[in-house]
Image (tube, helix red, strand yellow):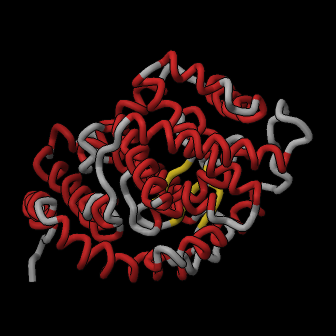
């Protein structure tokens, strides 16, 4: 039809961008027709197609893509000056295709209804409610720690390999599905990233590949965090794009798992978020609250902090700044600060459970 469709593809980025901007204004429509309609089919097809492969197909794809882009830039470097117009057309044609695939395959989930609305939870909470839920989480965490450790000063080490943990993760969603049927997770596509070392030095525990729908876990992180991080990435895979919402669902999946070690990972993860919120509101109360937590739990927290401290690099702030900009561009107006929204979900969910 067109002798050279590249210019049309390149300029399609403008209407595509405007369509996404328009749909952002109608989260109910996105929720009903995309997140609960089209997307589960897309996700299931990707997981059925790629989930059985024992390594990350998406990471291999990214690796070849990076090599191809570098070779293309080198081969076409002279065209930047001599043939700027058509060089830019080819670049923007590629960007348009990626932008379209990114949103169709996953990213429209950024614009669905906020999770507290779809669950019928309040968006706000009082300090009293925060303290009440935190006390409950401390009691649960201490009790689980007591079951797993010989004394309250020992940190918990999981007796499973990381590969076995990945195999166990779906069981948490099977249990959670009884309360939230739309969180059915089958087939699975959950893998350790081939880029675990770079992810570590960039400061990331994992990511969802939006173009292959594979949940990628940083294979180097502390084993104690592995169950809840893997559950977090599955939450992304099931259509919860926002980090705070994936944190909440990942935590719920871990605490609903039949395995006690998963429960411990989940409860202490949710507790950590609440403790940080208490610190923001009253740091004196925060330190008083820490005294009621088993020392072994605090050692697990320190173990995680030490891991990241030992893998810092000068470029990490740049990676975090870039990711922060990405979150803001995708409907998380507070960027990485929006992670604190998870506390509102935790507090109001458990308050409702207590009623």
Q: Residue at x 67, y 29 (%)?
A: 292
Q: Residue furthest front?
A: 355
The x and y percentages for residue 250 are 54, 57
Q: Is residue 63 left or right of residue 86?
A: right
Q: Residue at x 84, y 48 (%)?
A: 148
Q: Nearer the viewer, residue 122 or 118?
A: 122
Q: Residue at x 63, y 68 (%)?
A: 172
Q: Is residue 146 above or below residue 102?
A: above
The x and y percentages for residue 213 are 47, 67
Q: Is residue 275 visible?
A: yes
Q: Residue furthest top?
A: 284
Q: Is residue 238 above or below residue 159?
A: below
Figure quadrant of the C terminus: bottom left
Q: Nearer the viewer, residue 187 or 136?
A: 136
Q: Is residue 353 left or right of residue 295?
A: left
The x and y percentages for residue 229 are 59, 51
Figure quadrant of the N terminus: bottom left
**For the image shown, how many numbered marks are present on the structure?**
0
Kindly indicate the quadrant of the structure image that contains residue 170: bottom right
Kindly indicate the quadrant of the structure image that contains residue 55: bottom right
Q: Is residue 324 left or right of residue 157?
A: left
Q: Nearer the viewer, residue 174 or 306?
A: 174
The x and y percentages for residue 138 are 64, 40
Q: Is residue 188 left or right of residue 241?
A: right
Kindly indicate the quadrant of the structure image that contains residue 100: bottom left
Q: Nearer the viewer, residue 251 or 195?
A: 251
Q: Residue at x 82, y 44 (%)?
A: 146
Q: Residue furthest right?
A: 150
């Amino acid at each position: 039809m067109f002798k050279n469709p590249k210019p049309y593809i390149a300029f399609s980025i403008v209407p595509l961008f405007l369509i996404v901007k328009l749909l952002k204004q109608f989260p109910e429509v996105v929720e009903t027709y995309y997140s609960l309609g089209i997307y589960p089919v897309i996700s299931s097809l990707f997981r059925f197609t790629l989930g059985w492969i024992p390594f990350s197909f998406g990471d291999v794809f990214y690796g070849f893509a990076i090599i191809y882009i570098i070779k293309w830039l080198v081969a076409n470097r002279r065209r930047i000056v001599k043939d700027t117009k058509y060089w830019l057309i080819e670049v923007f044609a590629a960007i348009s295709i990626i932008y379209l695939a990114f949103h169709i395959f996953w990213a429209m989930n950024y614009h669905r209804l906020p999770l507290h609305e779809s669950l019928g939870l309040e968006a706000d909470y009082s300090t009293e409610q925060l303290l009440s839920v935190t006390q409950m989480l401390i009691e649960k965490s201490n009790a689980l720690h007591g079951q797993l450790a010989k004394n309250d000063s020992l940190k918990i080490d999981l007796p499973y390999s990381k590969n076995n943990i990945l195999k166990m993760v779906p069981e948490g969603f099977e249990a959670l599905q009884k309360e939230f049927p739309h969180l059915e997770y089958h087939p699975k596509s959950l893998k350790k990233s081939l880029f675990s070392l770079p992810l570590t030095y960039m400061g990331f525990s994992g990511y969802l590949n939006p173009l292959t729908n594979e949940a990628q876990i940083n294979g180097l992180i502390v084993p104690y965090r592995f169950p809840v991080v893997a559950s977090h990435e599955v939450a992304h895979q099931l259509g919860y794009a926002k980090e705070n919402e994936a944190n909440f669902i990942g935590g719920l999946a871990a605490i609903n798992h039949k395995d006690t070690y998963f429960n411990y990972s989940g409860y202490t993860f949710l507790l950590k978020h609440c403790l940080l919120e208490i610190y923001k509101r009253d740091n004196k109360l925060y330190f008083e609250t820490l005294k009621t937590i088993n020392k072994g739990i605090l050692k697990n927290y320190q173990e995680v902090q030490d891991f990241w401290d030992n893998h810092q690099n000068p470029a990490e702030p740049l990676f975090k700044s870039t990711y922060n900009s990405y979150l803001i561009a995708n409907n998380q107006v507070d960027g990485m600060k929006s992670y604190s929204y998870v506390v509102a979900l935790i507090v109001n969910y458990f308050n409702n459970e207590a009623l």
